[in-house]
Amino acid sequence: MAATIMDRILASSNLPSVPLVALKVLKLTQQEDVSIDDIAQVIQKDPALTAKLLQTANSPLFGLAKKVASIQQATVILGLRTVKVMALSFSLVDALRKSQDGEFDYPRYWRRSLTSAAVAKLLAQRCAGLRAHECFLCGLLADIGMLAAYQCVSDVYRPVLSRFAANPRPIQEIEAEVLGLTHARISGEMLRKWSLPDILCDAVAAHHGEGLESLGERPRMLASVIYAAASIAELFCGDVESWRHNEVKAHCLKLIPITSEALEEALEEIHTDVSGMASLFKLEIGESVSYETLRTQAMMQMANISMSAEMERAEATTRAEQVTQELKEVSHKAA
């Protein structure tokens, strides 16, 4: 069944495609002798993309002291890889946004995707040997398999959404139960169909732990960061209850070489980064929460759990005392 579903998705005419400008930028950056002017000429043919890239370069996300006035300047200051990733990100988000329709919860999807992207970047900045904006792109596209499944095989994906709406929990668990495969695998295959580098495809496909150990060192490290980012995104988006935040942090500390202090710093910055990116991408993401709010929610949930447990113990004690008294009365009457 899983293979049939994957085949249907990849062969569907509804499958999201990569915009032409993004493909050109991607192909150019894969050439060894590409110049800054080559990249700038391609991007400048799309005025909307040019404006967004310049707005991004001058945003607080990069914190540059000098105002960036041209794509050439942005490429020099930010680097070729960063400009490539941002061009791909804006182009793909625009393409995906145009196809929005139906009952799919798009604000929730974009909140989850932007949170994964922001966290992946923040974690990569604190881990040696990783490219922050490569991690950002993987985080942004990691859940695109959800959109593809909804748009291409809605007949089999709607039951997944119904189960999730009725009882929110990690959606990949529901997908595995209903479909026999997860959105992570679908996302990886979509990126491969778009001819993105294998390392990105492999990392995205393994971003919930599937096949993680079978990857080479560099793709495994990249996949581990995306896995950690996805776990934190689930927490911040409500797929995982707030009181489990210490479990999620412990999971991340096992996955990637980061200190507890550095992880806390990253968590504190998530809300600001996600809000900033939602504004840059002009995406409606619904209500997002800060780390402080998340911790407050966790304390309230733990208090409720403790109170419920205490009430259950009190009820059990009362019932035991009642049974003991009844037995005494029966024994007394029998005597």
Image (cartoon, rainbow, N blue to C red):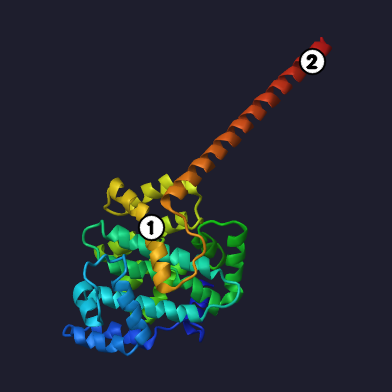
Label 2: which secondary element:
helix
Residue 91 image offset from top left, x and y in percent: 38, 80
| Residue placed under numbered mark 2 in the picture | 329
Left or right placement of residue 212 versus residue 298 in this view? left
Question: Among all residues in the image, which is located at the extreme top?
Answer: 335
Please count the marks in the image.
2
| Residue placed under numbered mark 1 in the picture | 270
Give the residue displayed 53% in from the left and 65% down from the top: 175
10 Å crowding of disc 2: few (<14), some (14-19), many (20+):
few
Left or right placement of residue 228 versus residue 124 in this view? right
Quarter of the rendering containing residue 139: bottom left
User: Disc 1 residue type?
Assistant: Ile
Label 1: which secondary element:
helix
User: Disc 2 residue type?
Assistant: Glu
Specify the quadrant that holds the N terminus.
bottom right
Disc number at residue 286?
none
Give the residue displayed 52% in from the left and 64% down from the top: 286
Q: Is residue 197 visible in this depiction of the protein? A: no
Task: Please tell me which residue lies in front, 174 or 33.
Answer: 33
Quarter of the rendering containing residue 165: bottom right
